[in-house]
Amino acid sequence: MPNFYSAVLVNHREPLRIVETPAVTPPSGHLTVDVDFAGVCGTDVHLTDGRLPVPLPLVLGHEAVGRVRALGSGVTEDTLGAPLAVGDAVTWASNIACGSCFYCVEEQERSLCGNRKVYGINLGADDWPGGSGGYGQQMLLQPGTTLVRLPDALAPEQVVALGCAGPTVVHGLFGPARPSVGDTVVVQGSGPVGLASAMYAKLAGAATVIMVGAPAARLELATSIGACDVAIDITEMTDAADRIAAVTKLTPGGRGADLVVEATGFPPAVEEGMRLCRRNGRFLVLGQYTDHGQTPLNPHLITKGQLRVYGSWAFSGADYVKYVSTLPRLAERFDLRRLVTTFTLDAANEALQAMRDGTVMKAVLTPSASFGGEPTEKAGGAA
Amino acid sequence: MPNFYSAVLVNHREPLRIVETPAVTPPSGHLTVDVDFAGVCGTDVHLTDGRLPVPLPLVLGHEAVGRVRALGSGVTEDTLGAPLAVGDAVTWASNIACGSCFYCVEEQERSLCGNRKVYGINLGADDWPGGSGGYGQQMLLQPGTTLVRLPDALAPEQVVALGCAGPTVVHGLFGPARPSVGDTVVVQGSGPVGLASAMYAKLAGAATVIMVGAPAARLELATSIGACDVAIDITEMTDAADRIAAVTKLTPGGRGADLVVEATGFPPAVEEGMRLCRRNGRFLVLGQYTDHGQTPLNPHLITKGQLRVYGSWAFSGADYVKYVSTLPRLAERFDLRRLVTTFTLDAANEALQAMRDGTVMKAVLTPSASFGGEPTEKAGGAA
Amino acid sequence: MPNFYSAVLVNHREPLRIVETPAVTPPSGHLTVDVDFAGVCGTDVHLTDGRLPVPLPLVLGHEAVGRVRALGSGVTEDTLGAPLAVGDAVTWASNIACGSCFYCVEEQERSLCGNRKVYGINLGADDWPGGSGGYGQQMLLQPGTTLVRLPDALAPEQVVALGCAGPTVVHGLFGPARPSVGDTVVVQGSGPVGLASAMYAKLAGAATVIMVGAPAARLELATSIGACDVAIDITEMTDAADRIAAVTKLTPGGRGADLVVEATGFPPAVEEGMRLCRRNGRFLVLGQYTDHGQTPLNPHLITKGQLRVYGSWAFSGADYVKYVSTLPRLAERFDLRRLVTTFTLDAANEALQAMRDGTVMKAVLTPSASFGGEPTEKAGGAA
Amino acid sequence: MPNFYSAVLVNHREPLRIVETPAVTPPSGHLTVDVDFAGVCGTDVHLTDGRLPVPLPLVLGHEAVGRVRALGSGVTEDTLGAPLAVGDAVTWASNIACGSCFYCVEEQERSLCGNRKVYGINLGADDWPGGSGGYGQQMLLQPGTTLVRLPDALAPEQVVALGCAGPTVVHGLFGPARPSVGDTVVVQGSGPVGLASAMYAKLAGAATVIMVGAPAARLELATSIGACDVAIDITEMTDAADRIAAVTKLTPGGRGADLVVEATGFPPAVEEGMRLCRRNGRFLVLGQYTDHGQTPLNPHLITKGQLRVYGSWAFSGADYVKYVSTLPRLAERFDLRRLVTTFTLDAANEALQAMRDGTVMKAVLTPSASFGGEPTEKAGGAA
């Protein structure tokens, strides 16, 4: 078997290193894939910075699209029952729930499973050297992986363009907060989660989508692809009270929004979001993934407004399947390719820096096309 | 027409005064009632203290039960279509929605109508001298009042025992937060709203109800009538972290409660309530009626817990009807009379003080039985 | 006051007659309108045929758009609070619920009010000679009418194009059956209700809409304006089993549709619709308005399929407001004008015949532009 | 290892035969149990009659309670994470979903999994001679079995008393049809499914439960344990129109029931049930498990009544856990032991006959106490 390359996090706060690894034959129930595109997520920036406990060395990359390289015995179809063959374009959910805890069995809400294995996050490189994350030219996918063969109508870049923000938004937005035809929706935040929220709200028939975020380039992108009707730049309108007044004025009767989606990760945005809702409105708190501790918040807003406030955590395999199945319509309506900036695998550190700086909407690595575009032979030659 | 007596708020922060007023003949579409029982609500204490803007002079009393005294022309049945006759025992919702605003027409959520007229709160004594609140021997009820003839199975004291806490809880608890058979429910607060929440949760089949509140006498009452399975006294367990640990330990798998109901009015209870919920749990913020401003709160709890947090404001006529229609089963299961301490109308100031001090669960005035029990003749004699 | 003309149903099964009537000044709380467009509904055909009990003489027309002619005292704004002035373009719901029955008060579901007054149906011409239906140049609108000033973005023809099918579909489709992003939706029927269902499903983000109906011209129209992705002509594929096989094959995994909407009025379509649903799917029975008695149906389909079957009856003022508020987006996406064929008021009988024959999708009368386009003066001249 | 006995279906339409089988040591991930109680279900009667395709020979019995006999390696806790030890009283769901099909992954509705393995139904005796159904003294439980250690408050007879009707009702009733506090509920049918529906409706706070069924003995039992308020005997009131009139008269305002639960298996009951609902009411079609073909039904009832009609199929492991967790409150309120009539294992054919004749509410076998009460030694002695 020829070798292949991966970009590996060996120590926190150090650049990733390119490591060469021998390919493997997939055991029974497993399959291997050539990774064509791997998204660089804001979480990856946090991981390299050492803000979350992860096993080292680690091949990052929990957002990926590729082609089937080899099928282990017993692997004949994808999660939806479509037949699988070598060379098929596929994508897969990064996480595998345990299937036997309270949240998997009784609650049927696998996004909350406490025992999840996640490619590129808690499956260290030692599990299979070089092959457990998307920042590698090959990956070994385990039994239980939610795997979907791409519909013909979808290009791989379209699948990776939203990264994990896509299924995360599907999970949060299509629960009880679900946008309805005619809704006025405010999205707080203009990163991938905010952008995906705006696009899905539009797809669901929202009458008006107002985005409140920064920097200007992201707001312009969101506006120009049609994801929002109005954009408010928080670096220009720096006072929350002004923003609340401006947004409220745009809503029917000046009552506030039917639905507000928080996608900022910034704790004070939560009270601001409550103030943007109309009474009896819905507020989806989708961005408070990091524990920043307490922030001042007036709980009277919840009672007085009779608000329905929904948290949302991660996504399940079911959400991933729904995400891929709704992508053709999303891609038909919005030019997803405009979100993507590609980097070769050896430029992984530059890609991380671009995400850290917010200079691109979505950095995407192209592992299989890196190192000459014929990765395994070149790797073989380098050996 | 003979006269009658009312206890009237003439100036804030002064004792109510007994005022004598001539009775009236109800105009078309109206009816008059003799008030048998009028609940003394915590809100009445706030009103006498001048904490809310209300017209003066004001006959307090937005919780009442009585008997039909006279029917204006065209008034022949109650809201449910049951025929009405002089002498029938009746109760009525305190508020009348406008029927033509966004919340009345489009949202069909009349508890949020901004133009509501409320007996005993914003209908001043000048609207009909002495007859617009329950702290009077007679009331004049307007067209649009939600009026229900009492089922035979219900005694008037049972209807007034929970006061406006009853329909308020029906409104909040039987929306999307609705308790389900088998749920573990935590109720924060042991006043009328907390107590009604606990009883309704039990009625809905909750497996376990845990009440967190004070003082001890109220917790003992809640426990002894069967409204809760476990009571935790916050004056004994003064640290929130201890309470969270103690309550969580009582829930299945130590995961936290399926449903938490906040009924305290104390802002820090909101974060504590979020910490008492299990992941994917529901949290009903029912008690934050007063704007106390900001309090420290960690919004990460909402996202991480994937909580569903519901505010609830006031109640509508529909809720009041539902409240009365569910009361027979509630009264069958819980001894509602034990909640009530009666006071004659001339002791209205003592009743308010008892509610201010928390020395009784529910103070109730007995207007029609006050002043000798034959109020109108006596009033006539006094004139 | 000048006179105006109406097309009046004097006797069942006779042509409508043009009748001249004097205009009136609107009493307090009322307003008068000039009727610019009045939809001709399939129900109107039934009414002229005498299939429903209605008062005679009757001015037909329960779907209309016009301009404010005169405002009675106290009428200053529309249902949403927008200010009203003479000449404003407006539309209004045909029905006025009583506001005081079980369905109005407790159930908050005014479409089920049993005491509704309906312009053009149960408000006979004697109520206000000539002015109680849309088949007249003027109408007198009563207090309680849900009235909406048209948004600037909407042309009156766009509002009338779907007639009462529009709010009827809003009522049915945006209840619990609600289409979701990514759904595969089958619509049975290609009349106005079927067409509106298909368009709203698309607007809500349905991935695929399959229409099963006839005649070919309607299916072609539905396809060419983008309301459906696939159309199956029941006059070509006459066997239900064939249709079920063909439609099922088009659904993901051959499992059947996520949502089926019955809009045919043909009883056997109900079992066929159940067979088109996937297990756990939703089935909206929107078209069985007429009681045709029993039809053979296998109820095992409901249990085995774990179907959720929803009936839907009529619409409320709230639905009408929602309909108008969602129309700008619908009109942006679909060319609603292509549905409309106009007739002058004196051609009302031809319009009814065209609807009876299905030769047009939607016949619409132009009362204010009839009789020379200056109806009142001409009417005056004719007097 | 000692031997044990089972009652085995060798050929359809022949009595079960007692077969002796050697015990086994549970492989990794498996466990063995001693079966204390095994319910005899109506489905078992159908299976012996050959009405469903099943593998032969077959040990019947898909409802069972027992004690842990031996734990295979790796089996240390039940589905809820409670530690397991030999001798622990346990119960288990009869079915094991595949976990990888559309209904398991995307729909998260495992009751609809098409690949389910079911103890006592499609797991033939050849899978493990004698040990795959509850009609045996021992069973071998496979990995993936939903297994729950009994709470201390529950006696095994209480768990088996409702048999699979218990989780079937939990699955159907606590979906969208869910009874609410104050509801008027009609239950059609008085077998185990009807009885469980009535009890759970009461537990959920229904104001009134009306049971329509037969024979008289079952209705008397339902009434005397408090499961229903009124019972109507269909053998006395034989005309459906009379029953509809009688039941409707008992509902508030004569409008019909808020919720009707069909639990008869008799196709014409479905239209009757629709006629028992009030408008906007819910109708749960829980009993149409068998395909009896078409029956006359008027679909206009669905549209006119704006009914919400819900099918429900089988139950999942999650439902089984919920069932067991709600049983303590159910058992506290209703004397479940009164439902049970026990038979020893060698009287299995008599038990089946009693269920076929409806002479008992619930026949239950006592395998571990049969053949002398020390089954394994006796079996050993017999070897």
Image (cartoon, coloured by chain):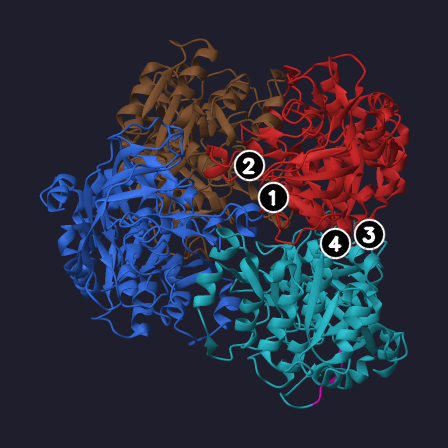
Chain colours: A brown, B red, C blue, D cyan
State which quarter of the image contains the N terminus of chain B.
top right
Both marks 2 and 1 on one chain: yes
Task: Determine which of the numbered discs, if any, sits on residue D326 in the image.
Answer: 4
Q: Closer to us: mark 1 or mark 3?
A: 1
**Above-or-below relation of D78 to B127:** below
Q: Secondary structure at mark 2?
A: helix
Residue displayed at 51% across by 21% down: A275
Q: Closer to us: mark 4 or mark 2?
A: 2
Q: Read off the residue under disc 2.
A: B110
Indicate the chain on which mark 3 is placed: B
Task: Determine which of the numbered discs, if any, sits on residue B318 in the image.
Answer: 1
Q: Read off the residue under disc 3.
A: B332
Residue contact between numbered discs 2 and 1, judged by CB atoms under 8 Å = yes
Q: Secondary structure at mark 1?
A: helix
Residue contact between numbered discs 1 and 3, judged by CB atoms under 8 Å = no
Q: Which residues are magenta?
A: D15-21
Residue C379 in the figure: left or right of residue D153: left
Could you tell me the amino acid type at mark 3?
Glu
Both marks 1 and 3 on one chain: yes
Residue contact between numbered discs 4 and 2, judged by CB atoms under 8 Å = no
**Above-or-below relation of C217 to D5:** above
B339 vs C215, nearest the viewer: B339
Secondary structure mostly seen in magenta is strand
Could you tell me the amino acid type at mark 1?
Ala
**Above-or-below relation of D163 to B115:** below
Q: Earlier in the sequence, mark 3 or mark 2?
A: 2
Characterize the local packing of mark 4: few (<14), some (14-19) or many (20 or more) Cα atoms within 10 angstroms.
many
| Magenta stretch encompasses residue D16 | yes
Q: Residue A84 placed where, x, y %?
A: 37, 54
Q: Residue C191 placed where, x, y %?
A: 26, 58
